[in-house]
């Protein structure tokens, strides 16, 4: 395993066993580094190549490839998804098999706590662990105070203060990916995601562009999700800045991001309490006593409505059809490979 060329990409004994079980006859193991329309770039033990691939494949997927064809996608350990902006019934895989979601929060503008909260929900929901990189610390008078703001929202996350100008925080980010972990960058356009990647790689592999002078808005420079090998260990997936972060069925993520409110809700008189002003609501009582900031309850309620909406728009038939299609692909591949 130690000298397997895929080890730096995260290949391990668990994956080897999974591959044996799911895809031994379907080709050779590979990891998806970029997804294009109908095609994917993969890295195998012997080369990098472009293969034809079915829809639903995500950057970071472990797959089997047979020649120039992606035949099987291994079950994912974690997946970061969002609702597609162009089609409410479809979810889009931002990254698969991720260990750490690195949320970038730029300090060249006011910290957008609303956005951060959503990103934390999506990150917890993925099955990976979130961390926050405060970027452009050189442009902020008091980065430590900004870190406290983040920690007040979620005391469980690692917060790293970074600056690409002097390299502050870069070793700490590198450490999050060691020895062979997978990270994905999340954050608005212009937050400095690709700049962090270039710093970690030690060369300008990813394009970057200055933010607009007036409102510090990014230019959507990165357009694909690219999995890149970090020399100090691990891989990092650079992503395009997401405009409005749309949520999918983030139920789990919601309780993970708001453990305080979920805990309080357990003490409401009615189990289905919606925490609107009504008797016996422990959440409202906590707001009343100042224990729970009213803004925090407001963003919880807002996210909860969004989650409910997203769940209603899930089409179970479409999901079943997708599963059936994959089964068929697996079956065909097995039949083809039988002697
Ligand atoms: N002063 C300063 N500028 C930075 C820092 N990090 C990034 N920038 C600048 O911020 C701008 C945007 O950085 P990018 O890395 O392109 O941002 P991005 O998040 O990849 O943006 P998209 O690809 O559009 O999603 C560039 O002009 C960078 O040089 C930093 O630590 N300090
Ligand atoms: Mg970028
Ligand atoms: Zn209540």
Image: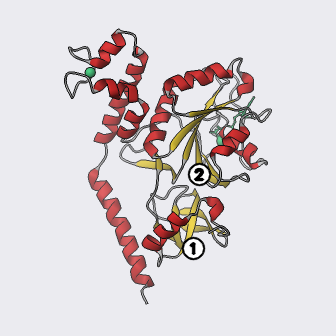
Which residue is the site of mark 2?
182
Residue 319 quadrant: bottom left
The foreground one among 16 and 104 is 16
- Measure how far apart labels 2 and 1 are at the Cα level: 25 Å
Q: Is label 2 within 8 A of ligand 2 (CB to nearest ligand atom)?
A: no
Quadrant of the drawing holding the N terminus: bottom right
Residue 194 visible at all: no
- Mark 2 Cα within 10 Å, few/some/many (few <14, many 20+)? many
Q: Tell which tag, 2 or 1, sits nearer the viewer.
A: 2
Dot 1 lies on which element?
loop
Name the spot of residue 184 as percent of width and height, x first: 58, 46
Query: Tag on residue 217?
Result: none
Which numbered disc, 2 or 1, marks the residue that appears first in the sequence? 1
Judged from the image, the quadrant occupied by ligand 3 is: top left
Residue 65 visible at all: yes
Quadrant of the drawing holding the C terminus: bottom left
Instruction: Please say which color scheme the image uses.
Output: secondary structure
Q: Is residue 100 above or below residue 33?
A: above
Which residue ends up furthest to the bottom in the rendered image?
339
Q: Is residue 140 above or below residue 225?
A: above
Q: Residue at x 62, y 52 (%)?
A: 226
Q: Residue at x 71, y 47 (%)?
A: 206
Dot 2 lies on which element?
strand
Q: Is residue 212 above or below residue 202?
A: above
Name the spot of residue 200 as percent of width and height, x first: 73, 46
Please say if the residues under marks 2 and 1 sit with CB atoms less than 8 Å apart: no
Name the spot of residue 21 as percent of width and height, x first: 43, 72
Say left or right for 168 vs 117. right
Query: Tag on residue 68?
Result: 1
Name the spot of residue 69 as percent of width and height, x first: 53, 72
Residue 211 quadrant: top right
Q: Is residue 46 above or below residue 283?
A: below
């Amino acid at each position: 395993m130690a000298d397997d060329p895929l080890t730096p990409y995260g290949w391990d004994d668990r994956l080897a066993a999974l591959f044996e079980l799911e895809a031994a006859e379907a080709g050779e193991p590979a990891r998806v580094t970029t997804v294009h329309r109908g095609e994917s770039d993969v890295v195998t033990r012997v080369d990098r190549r472009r293969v034809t691939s079915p829809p639903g494949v995500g950057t970071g997927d472990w797959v089997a490839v047979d020649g120039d064809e992606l035949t099987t996608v291994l079950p994912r350990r974690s997946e970061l998804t969002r609702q597609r902006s162009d089609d409410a019934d479809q979810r889009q895989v931002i990254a698969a098999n991720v260990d750490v979601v690195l949320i970038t929060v730029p300090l060249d503008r006011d910290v957008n706590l609303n956005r951060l909260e959503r990103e934390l929900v999506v990150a917890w929901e993925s099955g990976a662990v979130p961390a926050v990189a405060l970027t452009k610390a050189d442009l902020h008078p008091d980065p430590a105070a900004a870190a406290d703001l983040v920690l007040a929202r979620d005391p469980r996350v690692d917060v790293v203060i970074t600056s690409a100008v002097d390299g502050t925080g870069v070793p700490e980010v590198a450490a999050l990916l060691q020895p062979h972990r997978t990270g994905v960058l999340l954050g608005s356009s212009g937050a400095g995601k690709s700049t962090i990647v270039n710093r970690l790689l030690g060369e300008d592999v990813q394009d970057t562009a200055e933010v607009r002078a007036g409102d510090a808005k990014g230019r959507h420079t990165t357009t694909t999700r690219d999995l890149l090998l970090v020399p100090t260990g691990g891989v990092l997936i650079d992503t395009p800045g997401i405009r409005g972060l749309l949520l999918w069925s983030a139920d789990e993520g919601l309780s993970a991001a708001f453990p305080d409110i979920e805990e309080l809700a357990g003490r409401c008189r009615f189990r289905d309490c919606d925490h609107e002003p009504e008797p016996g609501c422990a959440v409202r009582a906590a707001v009343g006593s100042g224990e729970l900031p009213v803004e925090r309850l407001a963003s919880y309620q807002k996210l909860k409505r969004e989650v409910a909406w997203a769940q209603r728009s899930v089409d179970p038939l479409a999901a079943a059809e997708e599963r059936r299609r994959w089964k068929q692909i697996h079956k065909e591949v097995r039949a083809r490979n039988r002697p």
